[in-house]
Image (spheres, rainbow, N blue to C red):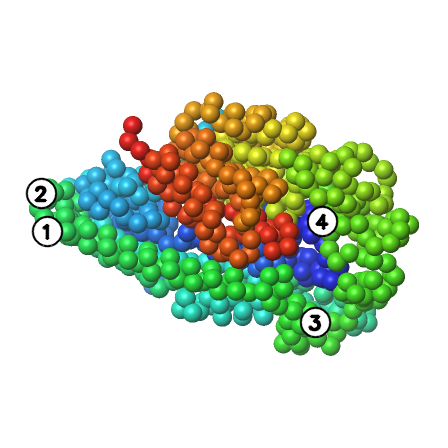
Amino acid sequence: FTPTNMTMTNHQQPNQHTTHFQTRKSNCLSKRDKSSAGRIDPRAVDICAEINSREEYYTTSSCAGRCFLYCGDGIKSWHAPANDDTVVTTTNNSSTSSSNAHGFFQRTRVNHDLIHEPTRYFNLSTLTCDRTGGGDPIPTIGQFESLGNNENFKNKLEEHVPFSNNDGDDDTAAPIWLRYEPFILHVMCRSLKAASVLMALARPSFKNVGLTSWNVGGESEDVYNSYISGDSNGNIDNKVTAAVSFKNQQCKGGGPRYLVAIWGDEGLDMPLSLPSAPRKGLFYNCDEDGNESGVVNAEWLAQLVNERHGRNWKKIERFVDAMRGLEEDCPVDDVGGDDAAAAKTSGMMDSLTLTNEQQQQHDDQQGNKSARVLSGLPIPRSYDVVGDVAILNNLPEGDEETQKKVGEWIMKKNKAIKIVVARHCALSTEDRSPGSSGLKQLAGHPRDPIVTSHYEYGIKCVVDLNHTFFSPRMAPERLRLAQQVARGERVLVVFAGVGMDALQIAARTEAKEVLVIERNAIACECIRRGKLMLSRNKTAPCPGSGKGASERMRILEGDALELLPTLEEESYDRIVAPRPKEGSLDGDLGTGDAGMSFLLVMLPLLKPKGEVHWYDFAADHELPNCDRTRKTLESACQSLGLEMEIIHVARVGSIAKRQWRVCVDFRIVAKPAA
C-alpha cells in the first residue's frame, strides 16, 4: 500500500514512526463515510481539508454543528422504549419493573443548516408525516437493495422511524425536546508537540480542547521489562537487542497515538412539550397559524438555533484561518525528539539503541545538501512518483552520463521505482500533456509510451504520462472531493483526465451514478482500463465492492461544450470540474473567458441546492478570496437567473512561481420559477 503523498524529498525522508503514521492516515482517510448522510458536513470541509493537508495530522470524525428534535432520555442509542414488564436487577439483587429500563433515544428533523421554515420545523403534529420539517433530507438507500449490502443501514431507518409509537393520545408518549450540538472534531496527531500546537491554535476559538487519548504504541512497559529480563529459562539477551525488539513491537502497533478532541460550547437542550401533551407545543402549535404570537414564538425558537449556528461557524472560520497561518511544507513537530522524550518518561530511553542498519538509514536520510555531497551528483531537491515512474521537473545539470547516474541513484534509493524521467519542455498542449517528446528517460528499461498504473488510497488508475495530464500532488484534493459526495447523489465529472477523481468517488461513496466526460481519446482509454481494474477490486470500500462501483460509472468521450447541452437539465446533484489551464488565456493576466463558456452549459444541469467544485488559476496576490474567480461564477449564475453561495475556497497546488490552482466550491441556492 503506497503513501498518498507521492512527492518525494531528499531532505525529509520519513523515519519508521512517520511511515507508520502515514500508513494509518491513509487507511483512515480511505474508509467509506458511514454517517447517515455519507459525507462530511459542508461547513466542516474547510477545517478537515486544512488539517488533512498537513503530514502530522489527520481527522477521525467531525460534525459542523446541528440541531434536531428528540424524545427519550437524551442518550444516543437505537434502543426502543422497554416494555412495562421489564425486570431490572438492582445492586442489592432486588428486582423492580421499569417502563424505560434500557432507556431510549429517538430523533428527527436533523438539520446542519439554518432553520428557514420555523412554523414547519417546530410543528409537532406533523412529526410522522413530515420527517424532515425543512431540515436535512432523509438519506436514500434503495439503489443498493439488490446487492444486499446495505441491510444494516436500511433496518435502522425502517425499524426506528422517529416517534412512530407516539400518537399524541398514547399514555407512553414522551415529551419532545430541542437540542443543538456544536462543532466537534477529533484529530490524530503524530507527536505530542504536534498535538500541543493544534490545541494552541484551537483554544482561541473553542474553549473545550484537550488530549483525550495518549498511547505510546506497541507493548506496555511490563512487556518491555520481560524483553530485557530474558525468557522463562533465564536466558537473557543483551539489552540492545531487547530494546530493538521492543521498538519493533511499538512499530507493529503503529507507533504513538495522540488524539485531540475539539468541541464548541454553543449547546442547547430545551423541552418543546410536556408529558401530559407531547404533541402540543409549549411555544408553537399548528392551530395557531393565524395567531401572531404563536408564529413569533416559532421564529424565536429558530432564532435561538440560528444564532448558535452563526457563532459556531464563525469560530470554525477563525480556526481555519489559524491553521492556514502555519508554515507550509514545514512540519510543526520533531518526531525523533518527541519520541525520545516519551521514551525517557517511560524510563526506557537508555536501552533504545539503534542498530547499525537503522543508523545507516538515518545517515542516508540527511538533507539534500548531504545527498549531493555524498554522491557527488546534482540530485534534485524533490520529484514526483507516479506508479513505478519517478518524474523530475527539470533535467539534472551535467551531461547525459551524469543524468543517467542521477536516475540510477534515485532508483537505488527507492526499489519501487523502475524508470526515471525528466521533463524538458513546458506543458503547452491543449490537454496539458508533455507529448511524445516531452519526457526524457534517464534510467531504467526503455518504455515508449510511458504508461504506468498508479495507486491512491487503494484505488488504481492507468496513466499515460506522455499523452495525458496527471498530478500525484492532487491526491488529498481528490480525497476531499470524494468525502463530500452524499448517499444517492448523481455526480458529473467534467475534464476527467485519466479518471482518478471519478474512480475515487465511485469506489468510496454511495453515489447513484458517476458520469465522466473527457475529450482526450488516450485519456478515455485510461479511464476504461481504470474502470476495468476497479471492477476487479474486492477491497473498494463502497457497497458492492469494485464491481458495484464500476457499474455506476459511465464514460462519454467528446468535447464538453458539445456533450453537456445534450444532458437532461436539473439531473445532477454535484459537478466536479478540474478544468485544465488554457495557457496564457487563464490566470490573473489571462485574455480568455476564464471558463465562462463551460459554466453556461454546465450550471443548468444542477438540481436545486446542487454543488459545483470549480477549478481556476490565480496569482498569489489574489489569495485567499479569489475575487476574480468569484465574479466569474457570480456573473455566470446571474446570466442564468441563479443564486449561489460560496462554500469553500482554497489553493490546491502550485503550477508555476507565484501561480496557483484554486478550487471554489459553491452551491446553487435558488433557481428561477418554471
Q: Are marks 3 and 4 in contact (CB under 8 Å)?
A: no
The mark lying in front, picked from 1 and 3, is 1
Residue shown at 19%/44% (left/top)?
119
Helix, strand or loop for disc 4: strand
Which residue is identified by label 4?
384
Q: Which residue is farthest right?
A: 401
C-alpha span from label 1 to label 2: 9 Å
SS at mark 1? helix
Q: Quick one: quadrant of the C terminus?
A: top left
Mark 2 / mark 3, whichever is N-terminal: 3
Sooner in the amino-acid sequence: mark 4 or mark 2? 2
Pick whichever of labels 1 and 3 is earlier in the sequence.
Answer: 3
10 Å crowding of disc 4: few (<14), some (14-19), many (20+): some
Q: Quick one: label 3, few (<14), some, or many (20+) residues within 10 Å? A: some
Q: Which mark is residue 225?
A: 3
User: Disc 2 designates what residue?
Assistant: 290
Q: Which mark is residue 183?
A: none
Residue type, label 3: Asn
Taking the spot 52% from the left edge, 31% from the top edge, the residue there is 514
Which residue: 41% across, 48% down?
646
Looking at this view, is 378 or 300 the one in front?
378
The amino acid marked with disc number 2 is Gly
The residue under label 1 is 293
**Disc 1, disc 3: CB below 8 Å?**
no
What x and y, as percent, mark residue 499?
A: 61, 35
